[in-house]
Image (spheres, coloured by chain):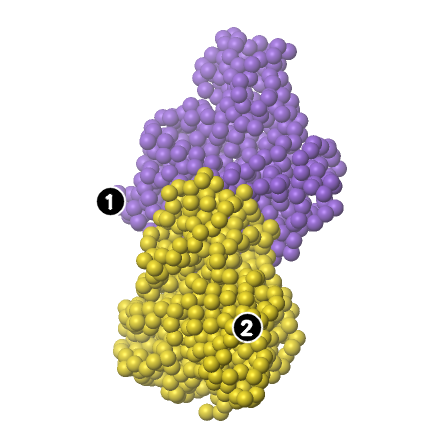
Chain colours: A purple, B yellow
């Protein structure tokens, strides 16, 4: 395999796989649940739901039989799960994981047609008629998830079986789509991101060219809008480089934005990158919930207008939160700006992991910020219905799996001059700088405690820069090197410590993770006069089950917020006692942990007038 | 034809058709536009859209040709328009109206199959396969609109052509559906109301029995929920008499509620009526916008949870407002309580007529209460897109037409003892009481002015009661009879004036229609800290085009509201000047008239903190 292709725009580089490892703490626990509970349960779900059977039938391993199980993009549930299975093996191999990968790869390989095409729905239901409905067919979306799983397997396990399948399919796509061939784009973006990753993995520039074509062709009315929706539903209303505000289906918009960022970075297209950064800024300032969740509208699963952020009607699809993380990660690498990591952290700790229960076996599709007393659920996706073991459209569960399985990759980056630590967790980090090899060990009880200790475990003799992210909420943070206080400057940036480091040097960062009140932007109608409670990166919420009073009518007053460590509660959390207007106390818990005891009234924002 | 069947529960009776006539003023003007502009334009639209051609093809008057124009319920656009055409003829005959009725009746008659079945979509697209998809097929919904049009023609014009078509179809339905026959209900209610009206018109009790069956069969899981939706989407989650809060698709819920009220009234089912009244109370207290609009959610076109009433995301389908009027009218007749007429008035003046432009040629499907600066429209139904000449699903335009054409019928009722005037307009009213014939003439410039003068133009020698509605907002109203002040008591009830009336007696009612500030219920998140401006029954709004400052950032302060008569503006309105926080003045216009100059930022509720 050729080396990963060069990024034309890259303020930061990802570390090589395995160079950063979370070794304990908050995320380690969540990942263990993911590995030991979620991924195995999903293997059974994929069987029970008929998703794997679709592939067996397409492969001819079973008679075609009656119909097709699930939605036409059901194959992607398998691919995302395979991706999680691959990343897990990079952390720690297991016979079970290897067997799943081997068996499923064989199935996928057998389902591939001689010319590289692969899609069980098209094979079983459409009689092999390809690309007849680019608007709704999801064929390139399915291909994209296959490519991503293949790249993950190649990187994480060195197994190139799926990569061979993926390149055959990608080669077919290159022959099929583009100027002078079929002019068209898929109604559901994803292929763009996947093709660029395949290009990075294989060095085949045709994949980048096709990704670039898909990005550029979009927004010129190639797609017939579906139903009542207009072309913005699938981002075909404007050329991508002319967009300054994301609209339409949130997951589609974000996967496209991430893919377009990949294309901009690989082709050195600063104009395109600037347009995307502008959309990101609009999104974070006016279309993102406090939890990092995005997508204000159930109708069309869509972004709302700026400042249309109703907590009760929030859609905040788990997949959209994950897509937001993927996009921000790409912008972080391109620019090095800590605001992107701030949003990644906010989104991961809140909107992403609220999507999975503490047991790892149930999932939210929709991550609302408010449930009233007697709220009515008439939809499997509604938060009011509680987390579900699986869905008819099961995009979210395996998306959570692959995100948790690959989380190591997001904690740090490097550049020629140093290492940047973006997410705080007990971890080891290694990086190759121009000056030589660097090793770090991070110790922390973050997010419950604000102290982060970074010990240098390897260093060249030359000076280099250790950069630590100071989250935007971390005003008042302090730092020291070997016990000597360091100026930190304002929060919301990287603290850059450049010196000649020696093994054993110790950096201590103290972040103010104590409970704070957050006041909303005045332009958001539905939370005017309210506050929310946050501790460090965690957004808190009030669940009825913890209160002595009726939550719907509750209001808070000024007065001290009291943190209480509760190792017994919800897998171990810090709760916050908040004075209520009537003199009693309200108890807030981390938002991600809500609906793990009962599904009842809950609110992030609470009346504070 | 037999006389109209007896209602078992009827505090009030509708007047016979033609007994009440609006002779001038606000509604007269709207109706003239409806008659001279809207209905003729619709005749052309029905042709252009292919809706009439569907019927010609089904009738064999044209070769079946390629496909079907519009949605599978397209026939109903014709039926609702025919209903409007019929009611118009009761007001004033015209050769054009008569010709439309005759020609279209002939078409509908010819499209009917020998056994009474009639549906152009089923004939042309489904090869005559009937009732195969009760969930989505809309066959009984289409039948319902046919029955309603037929009853209107019979009553308004004495033409029984369509009534014969309708009874043949209804007879087939009676043979097809019910216990021991096909057990099923239609995914879209309406047939219930229509069958009861047909029963009232023909005296055929089988129609009432079938309506009763459809009401009782609902809520027992006969329907397979569509897509992501649960059974509440089409009110199949609970038996109708167990419902206390309306949920799901608002138009469906309201048509069903109206039909169930008809059944309760005709069968003397007080328990069912009480359940419906309870749902109405919940709706008006917690699920109705200030405009009378209902349906908080675009997703599923559905009612929200109680107090989920975001102004920006409001769906408030024009048809839902009309359905709300139809339901309230039935409850008004059943109970005589003025609260039902209060809601009728609020809904008509605001949520219904905002659905049609001042020219009568463009329509809103969705009646939002707030549009931000740079709000994005990606849907033909979005208010941001402006009123549209017609829709792919064109349910709303002809629904507005039949509502305006039949408005006379809602202004007054009678009982054995007297006449009740519910809506104030220049009008003549005649009623037959136990004591003899009564005549009234109403003179008023309502809603722009609050004085209503009722002159007795006919009276028996015995005493009877003239009842005038005192709207709930009319605190401080005054009344006199022949110049002698009368105690009015509190507002929100009927003012009952019982005496021996003489021709020439004059009652003067003065309603305080001056501008007032309305404060929202504290439980509605998105308008907390805001006020709205109302004048009499009219809700006002602020349009950017009238302001010197940016509406999105505007806030109002205390201080006098100044009314300004503007005969030159928007067909003649009173505007209200409202002090802004920055010392300037904001101008409010009646909500119904917004988006008649430009489609820009607009808000009903405005920050008043």
Chain at tag 2: B
**B165 on left or right of A569:** left
Separation of marks 2 and 1 at Cα, in angstroms: 89 Å
Which quadrant holds residue B129? bottom left
Vertical comparison of A270 with B522: above or below: above
Residue A592: give x, y in percent of width and height: 62, 40
Residue B213: image location, x then y, percent: 58, 79
Q: Residue at x 50, y 66 (%)?
A: B510
Quadrant location of the N terminus of chain A?
A: top left
Judging from the image, mark 1 belongs to the subunit labelled: A
Q: Few, some or many C-alpha atoms within 10 Å of disc 2 (few <14, some 14-19, many ≥20)? A: few
Mark 1, secondary structure of its residue = loop
Q: Is residue A136 left or right of residue B514?
A: left
The vertical placement of B375 against A350, above or below, is: below
Q: Nearer the viewer, residue B359 or B589?
A: B589
Residue under label 2, please give it. Answer: B484
Residue B342 in view of the camera: yes
Residue A177 visible? The answer is no
Both labels 2 and 1 in a single chain: no
Q: Which residue is mark 1?
A: A180
User: In the image, is residue B106 above or below residue A320?
Assistant: below
């Amino acid at each position: 395999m050729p080396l990963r292709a060069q990024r034309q725009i890259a303020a930061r580089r990802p570390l090589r796989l395995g160079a950063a490892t979370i070794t304990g703490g908050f995320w380690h626990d969540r990942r263990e649940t993911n590995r030991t509970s979620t991924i195995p349960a999903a293997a059974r779900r994929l069987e029970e739901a008929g998703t794997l059977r679709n592939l067996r039938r397409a492969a001819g391993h079973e008679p075609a039989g009656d119909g097709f199980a699930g939605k036409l993009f059901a194959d992607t549930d398998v691919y995302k799960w395979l991706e999680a299975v691959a990343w897990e093996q990079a952390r720690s191999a297991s016979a079970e994981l290897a067997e799943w990968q081997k068996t499923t790869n064989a199935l996928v390989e057998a389902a591939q047609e001689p010319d590289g095409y692969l899609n069980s729905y098209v094979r079983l239901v459409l009689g092999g008629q390809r690309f007849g409905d680019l608007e709704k067919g999801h064929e390139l979306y399915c291909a994209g998830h296959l490519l991503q799983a293949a790249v993950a397997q190649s990187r994480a396990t060195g197994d190139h079986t799926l990569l061979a399948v993926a390149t055959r399919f990608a080669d077919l796509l290159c022959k099929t789509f583009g100027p002078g061939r079929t002019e068209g784009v898929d109604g559901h973006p994803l292929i763009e991101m996947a093709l660029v990753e395949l290009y990075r993995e294989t060095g085949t520039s045709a994949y980048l060219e096709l990704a670039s074509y898909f990005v550029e062709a979009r927004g010129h009315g190639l797609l017939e809008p579906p139903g009542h929706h207009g072309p913005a539903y699938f981002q075909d209303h404007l050329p991508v480089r002319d967009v300054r505000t994301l609209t339409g289906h949130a997951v589609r918009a974000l996967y496209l934005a991430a893919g377009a960022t990949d294309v901009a970075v690989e082709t050195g297209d600063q104009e395109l990158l600037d347009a995307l950064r502008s959309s990101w800024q609009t999104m974070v300032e006016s279309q993102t919930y406090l939890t990092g969740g995005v997508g204000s509208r159930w109708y069309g699963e869509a972004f709302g207008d700026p400042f249309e952020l109703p907590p009760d009607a929030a859609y905040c699809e788990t997949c959209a939160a994950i897509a937001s993380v993927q996009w921000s990660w790409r912008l972080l690498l391109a620019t090095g700006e800590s605001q992107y990591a701030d949003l990644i952290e906010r989104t991961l700790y809140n909107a992403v992991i609220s999507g999975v229960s503490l047991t790892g076996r149930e999932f939210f599709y929709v991550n609302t910020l408010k449930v009233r007393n007697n709220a009515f659920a008439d939809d499997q996706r509604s938060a009011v219905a509680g987390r579900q073991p699986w869905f008819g459209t099961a995009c979210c569960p395996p998306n959570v799996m692959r995100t948790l399985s690959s989380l190591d990759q997001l904690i740090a980056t490097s550049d020629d001059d140093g290492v940047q630590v973006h997410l705080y967790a007990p971890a080891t980090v290694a990086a190759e700088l121009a000056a030589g090899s660097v090793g770090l060990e991070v110790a922390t009880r973050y997010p419950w405690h604000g102290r982060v200790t970074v010990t240098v475990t390897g260093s060249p003799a030359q000076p280099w820069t250790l950069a630590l992210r100071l989250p935007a909420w971390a005003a008042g943070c302090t730092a020291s090197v070997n016990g000597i206080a360091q100026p930190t400057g304002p929060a919301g940036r990287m603290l850059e410590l450049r010196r000649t480091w020696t093994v054993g040097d110790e950096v201590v960062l103290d972040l103010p993770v104590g409970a704070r009140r957050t006041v909303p932007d005045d332009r958001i109608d539905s939370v005017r006069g309210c506050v929310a409670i946050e501790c460090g990166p965690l957004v808190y919420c009030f669940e009825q089950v913890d209160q002595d009073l009726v939550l719907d009518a509750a209001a808070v007053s000024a007065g001290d917020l009291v943190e209480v460590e509760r190792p017994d509660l919800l897998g171990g959390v810090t709760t916050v006692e908040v004075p209520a207007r009537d003199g009693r106390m309200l108890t807030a818990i981390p938002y991600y942990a809500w609906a793990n005891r009962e599904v009842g009234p809950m609110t992030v924002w609470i009346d504070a007038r």
